[in-house]
Image (tube, coloured by chain):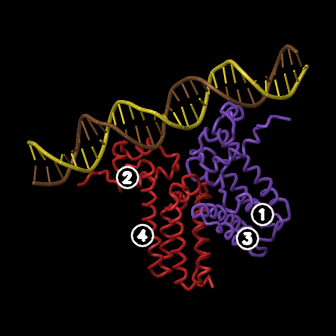
Chain colours: A red, B purple, C brown, D yellow
DNA sequence: TTTATTTTGTACCTATCGGTACAATGCGCG
DNA sequence: CGCGCATTGTACCGATAGGTACAAAATAAA
């Protein structure tokens, strides 16, 4: 049996702290208490400190979406891939009970620190969805517009769901967004 | 001539700092340098410190929207009021170059501190827009859904615009959202 | 002009921030 | 076992966090 605390095991814990408090609101002490690891271990795995931790977390989130959402959208049959996307989104964001770390980082000064990863996440998502829609028979322009519309709708729903503590808002929004992607809708 | 630094004069300056760095990322020293006021003056106007400053800023934002958006939506002729809303939104958020403080505060731990003000802002906006749509002939259900859809779309557009640094995204989205509110669209 | 009040600058407080140093462990392996 | 490396806890660092104390200055009221 390997050591219990490998770098990959810690990343999700750290991610949850960043998600809850934002980049600036996340202190090293909060991370140690949440992960159960002392500074020694933390800096052993992440020599770059807080910034490297956040980077690792963003990379992890990006990899998860790449595997479960973006890649399927690009290579699987479009309608199956889109259905899969909705499932992934709903479970990942816990029906609106969990926010999007990337979106949250985008809104304050944190954005500048991780600009590439943050913009890459959204650009890839939109491009992949657009691709699936085109393969489904949509015109390129309408596909691009709708892909943007959907990704942005998800982010907006996460903001409002958390702002108003409305349990049903996210699910309601997903239903509405889904209906805008019905095959044959665009052109 | 009264003193130059009245409380109301300082609030917009402080607001810009919070907008840029988020609640946790905003330090007193950053506020003093941005406003040109020392801690003495700052704590004279805001005895409650940082938290009171943020509260005042949120109140100020809420009042602006109440006056320029919510109230007109409730009392003016609906189509004129909605047109006015789009103008206000576009100029307030500087075509996506400026984020929504309330939305940003909603995403991290800051939310809990100002929960009422944050949820109130969005709930009032949605209710006011819904009201205008109903007076425009929409069915209550469709009006509620579309009002939510539009407010959430604006927030999503702000997130994505800042995340991707796409200059045109916000304007593009506004056009799309506008078209969903065309009279006679709902029922 | 004298008085009372509002407004400011400066110095200072403790707590915590992110980060470092390093010695003491644990553990895999020959 | 005993060697070597990965892992960890502890103590510590300077800087800055938010906040307070209070006397000097500006202003308004008399």
Q: Is residue A40 visible?
A: yes
Q: Residues within 10 Å of mark 4 (few under 14, many from 20)?
A: few
Q: Residue at x 57, y 52 (%)?
A: A109
Mark 3 to mark 4 CA distance (whole Å)? 35 Å
**Chain of the residue on which disc 1 is drawn:** B
Q: Residue at x 64, y 41 (%)?
A: B31
Q: Is residue B187 visible?
A: no
A99 sits left or right of B90 in the view: left
Q: Which label was assigned to residue B178?
A: 3
Q: Secondary structure at mark 1?
A: helix
Q: Residues within 10 Å of mark 1 (few under 14, many from 20)?
A: few
Q: Secondary structure at mark 3?
A: helix
Mark 1 to mark 2 CA distance (whole Å)? 47 Å
Tell me whether circle 4 and circle 2 mark residues in contact (CB < 8 Å): no
**Label 1 vs label 3, nearer the camera:** 1
Q: Residue at x 51, y 50 (%)?
A: A23
Which residue position is annotated with label 2? A10
Which residue position is annotated with label 1? B87
Q: Which label was assigned to residue A67?
A: 4
**Disc nearer the start of the sequence (4/2):** 2
- Picture coordinates of residue C9, whole percent (x, y): 68, 29
Q: Secondary structure at mark 4?
A: helix
- Picture coordinates of residue A41, whole percent (x, y): 34, 45
Depicted B20 relative to depicted C2: above or below: below
Mark 1 to mark 4 CA distance (whole Å)? 41 Å
């Amino acid at each position: 049996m390997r050591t219990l605390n490998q770098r990959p095991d810690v990343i999700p814990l750290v991610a949850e702290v960043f998600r809850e408090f934002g980049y600036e609101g996340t202190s090293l002490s909060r991370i140690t208490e949440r992960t159960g690891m002392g500074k020694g271990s933390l800096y052993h795995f992440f020599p770059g400190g807080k910034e490297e931790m956040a980077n690792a977390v963003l990379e992890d989130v990006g990899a998860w979406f790449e595997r479960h959402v973006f890649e399927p959208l690009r290579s699987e049959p479009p309608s199956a891939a889109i259905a899969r996307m909705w499932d992934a989104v709903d479970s990942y964001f816990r029906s609106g009970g969990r926010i999007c770390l990337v979106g949250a980082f985008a809104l304050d000064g944190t954005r500048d620190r991780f600009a590439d990863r943050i913009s890459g996440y959204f650009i890839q998502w939109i491009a992949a969805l657009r691709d699936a829609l085109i393969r489904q028979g949509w015109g390129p322009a309408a596909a691009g517009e709708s892909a943007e519309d959907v990704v942005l709708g998800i982010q907006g729903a996460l903001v409002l769901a958390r702002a108003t503590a409305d349990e049903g808002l996210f699910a309601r929004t997903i239903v509405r967004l889904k209906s805008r992607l019905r095959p044959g809708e665009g052109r």
